[in-house]
Image (cartoon, rainbow, N blue to C red):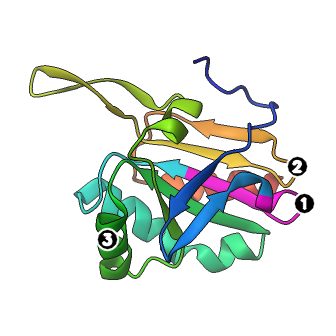
Amino acid sequence: MPALEIGQVVPDFTAPATSETTFTLSDYRGVSNVIIYFYPKDSTPGCTTEGQNFRDMKEELASNDTIVFGVSKDTMRRHENFKAKQEFNFELISDESEEVCNLFNVIQLKKLYGKEYMGIVRSTFLIDKEGVLREHWDKVRVKGHTDRVLESVKAL
């Protein structure tokens, strides 16, 4: 599947989320900007730090009409535990089927300790109120990342 392009309307999708909710992208059209960040696995150091950073800037994001959602292939049960333990104030989307990951083209070849495997590449997407992709960060390094995302939100 080709990657989404900046300036393109992101195709609508629906997926299960924490707090017994269902995420549908089109529900936010005309209402708020949406940050969707993809991360490899719940309760790992980088994923925990990234989630905490988004958690800690929720008020600033909200004052800029922006809501955040995290996505990984973890089960809903793992997501609920991770969200509760880290006191995340946003929902996590479970994508066990990889449908959402494939839509955003974040499943890629990775290497760890000399072994190659297919997995989620840490990526963030900023979608405006009209459903248009405005920014995309690929192969994210956690340190300073959420600050760069916030700068882009403020520039919308």
Numbered mark located on residue 82 in the image: 3
Which of the two discs, 3 and 1, labels the residue nearer the N terminus?
Answer: 1
Q: In the displayed structure, does residue 148 sit left or right of residue 24?
A: left
Choose the circle earlier in sequence order: 2 or 3: 3
User: Mark 3 is on which residue type?
Assistant: Phe
Identity of the residue drawn at 75% across and 39% down: 133
For disc 1, the neighbor class at 10 Å (few under 14, some 14 to 19, many from 20) is few
User: For residue 74, which quarter of the picture?
Assistant: bottom left
**Residue 82 in the image, given as x and y percentages of width and height:** 31, 71
Cα separation, mark 2 vs mark 1, equals 6 Å
The foreground one among 52 and 152 is 52
**Amino acid carrying mark 1 in the image:** Gly
Residue 94 at what x, y percent from top left? 44, 55
Task: Using the image as rendered, state which of residue 66 and residue 77 is in the foreground.
Answer: 77
User: How far apart are the two marked residues, 2 and 3, measured between alpha carbons?
Assistant: 31 Å
Residue at 72%, 25% in the rendered image: 5
Q: Which residue is mark 2?
A: 130
User: Residue at position x 71%, y 51% from top?
Assistant: 152
Q: Which mark is residue 108?
A: none
Q: Secondary structure at mark 1?
A: loop
